[in-house]
Amino acid sequence: ETSPMVYIRSNTDWILSLDTRDFGDTVGKYYVTTTGASSKVTTRLQERALITPEREIILARGKAPADNEFVTVEFSVENPEVGALEAGEYSNTIRYVLREGKE
């Protein structure tokens, strides 16, 4: 398994978040956390956060300048019931958002 790494370049202090506005059909419960980060990442999400529609989840914050700083993100899905996840097609859209921000 490989966790995605989000690379950041910014000339201002920054905030990296997930926008779940278009998060669609779900089977089970979806979670996100960060598992690592580079040196100029000052804070990061270290507990699992439940992904639900219409939510902003702050993944990390950092200082300027950021030149190829990174945050490693891990997603997981769990079935709330005992047993296997149901087969089918599910559409789940999330967006990474990088914006200017202070600590």
Image (cartoon, rainbow, N blue to C red):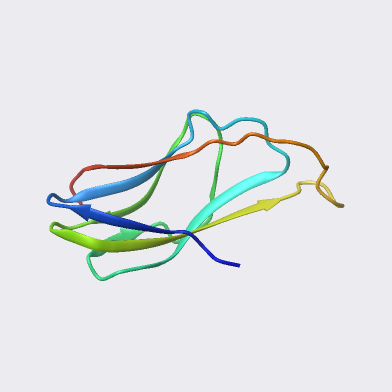
Toward the viewer: 88 or 46? Answer: 88
Q: Quadrant of the N terminus?
A: bottom right
Up/down of 65 relative to 58, above or below: below
Residue located farthest toward the right when viewing the structure as drawn: 83
Question: Residue 52 is drawn in which quadrant?
Answer: top right
Left or right of 99, for residue 31: right
Residue 46 quadrant: bottom left
Residue 41 point in image, percent of width and height = 27, 62
In this view of the protein, which residue sits in the foreground, 78 or 10?
Answer: 10
Rendered location of residue 20, percent (x, y)? 49, 35
Q: Residue furthest bottom?
A: 39
Residue ID at (18%, 47%): 102
Q: Residue at x 16, y 51 (%)?
A: 13
Residue drawn at the location 54% of the way across and 36% of the way down: 93
- The picture places residue 33, in percent across and down from the top left corner, at 49, 57
50 left or right of 6 in image: right
Q: Residue at x 20, y 44 (%)?
A: 101
* Image position, residue 95 (x, y; %): 43, 39
